[in-house]
Amino acid sequence: MPARQPAAGGGMPRRQKILRFSALVLGLVVLVCGAVVFFFPDALLQRVVEGRLTTALRESYPGASLRLSGVHYNVMANRIACDTAWLSRDDSSFTCRVTSLSVGGVRWMGLLTGREPGGACLGGSVIGADSVSVTFRPAGYAAGCGKVRLSGPDSEIVAGSVEIRPLLNDKLFFRGSRFRKTRFIIDARRCSVSGLAWSDLLRGGILHARSVRLQDVAADVMINKDKPASRDSAAPRMPGETLAALRDTLRLDSLVLTGGRLTYCERMSMERRPATLNFEEMAFLVTGLANHAGPDAGADIQASGIFAGGGTIHLSMLIPLVTRRYSFRYSGTVGGMDVRSLNSFVEISDNMRIKSGTLSSAAFDIHVNDGSATGTVHALYKNLIVASIDARTGSEKGILERFSSWIARNVTIRTANTTDRSGASKAGVVSYVRKKSDPFLGFSWFALRSGVGNIVGF
């Protein structure tokens, strides 16, 4: 039998050569691909990530679009980032811009292969951004914040320089409607959420946190009372109604505000400055804030501050969160003050000027049942002198002198309210029925003012 001839090329079988060569080519391809992904991931990410996210967004929210600029991936830090992200609707009714967005700590393999639930893959993630700005054109408002950080491991959200403000100045904002509107501006130096149920948040539809803290908050609220209230528009909602309208479940164990300032304004005409009340050094504690809760659920509010630059005010308020009836209760006290500090409001709203008067103390207890406010106001004061003024010029003389004389003859102003020998004093009766256009804060003030007027004689 003839001897078997050795294979050409050193005796290696042809099939073995092919397999070895294929393995070499495959390894080279894997090596090259790995090198590209490791050293040049940005170009791939820009195409793949933006393309897939845009497609998924369009499928879930028709009319929405997403653009990413400068996508980066740091393999060693396991962090994906982009310079700018734009999210918007085609009709420009909603826009969102995020700068220096980064996402780290994601278990990408489990997320991409689907072997692990999304909550497990994202539970250790940390999301950060240098700024976020959002525009809601139908509502006429924009919101934004500075640096923001969402951390799954720490169960917290921290944002700096939070603000909400209208897109237009006051003149244009109110001109856009034939009817009465409420304009608000809110700025906060810092907002933090702690004890956040991260897994519930990732699943969607549930926001549960142990506490929310707002620091150095300035709020400015204005009502243009120079226009009529719309008969067709819906009445301003109670806080509970606003919460109930949210589809997602919200539960906050406590909401804490420190360093607050509130400016409440009523504009009577375009030509005059608005009637203004100021609250400073405000502190709030709100507990039991939740929607979709039991029938007895209610928010308990404890607040304090400096009222009209003078008296220290303490306020307690209990607001049912389930009923749709306009019902709640509030009570409080006000410390001593020079009541002339109220001229910034009463000169414009009531065409009166407080020439002198000292408040020793005041207390109020008001019940609101289905939009009807009843209760009492107690106030100890002395040396109250009030003058009628011209609405246009602010003068105490001129054409209104005859009207002032008529008031003096027909309206008895109680110049003092002090205790008698038994320790009793005149109590003011609160009686105010909500008007359809009354916002929550405005209604609370109008009801309280009715009791004050009952004591003084307005």
Image (cartoon, helix red, strand yellow):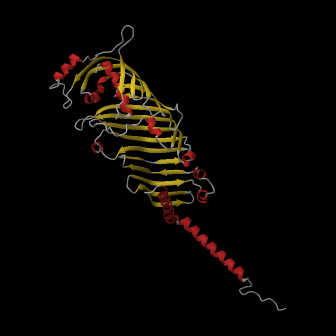
Left or right of 217 on screen, residue 339: left
Left or right of 19 on screen, residue 317: left
The single residue placed furthest to the front in the displayed view is: 232
For the question of whether residue 154 can be seen, the reply is no
The quadrant of the image that shows the C terminus is top left
Left or right of 448 on screen, residue 211: right
Asked if residue 138 is positioned above or below residue 455 in the image, the reply reads below
- Front residue of 134 and 76: 134
Picture quadrant of residue 271: top left
Residue at position x 60%, y 72% in the image: 29
The single residue placed furthest to the top in the displayed view is: 421
Picture quadrant of residue 20: bottom right
How many labels sit on residues?
Answer: 0
Residue 70 is situated, as x and y percent measured from the top left of the image, at 46, 61
Residue at position x 45%, y 51% in the image: 130
Asked if residue 286 is positioned above or below residue 102 in the image, the reply reads above
The single residue placed furthest to the left in the displayed view is: 398
Residue 303 is situated, as x and y percent measured from the top left of the image, at 44, 29
The quadrant of the image that shows the N terminus is bottom right
Residue 33 is situated, as x and y percent measured from the top left of the image, at 57, 69
The single residue placed furthest to the right in the displayed view is: 1
Residue 74 is situated, as x and y percent measured from the top left of the image, at 54, 59
For the question of whether residue 266 can be seen, the reply is yes
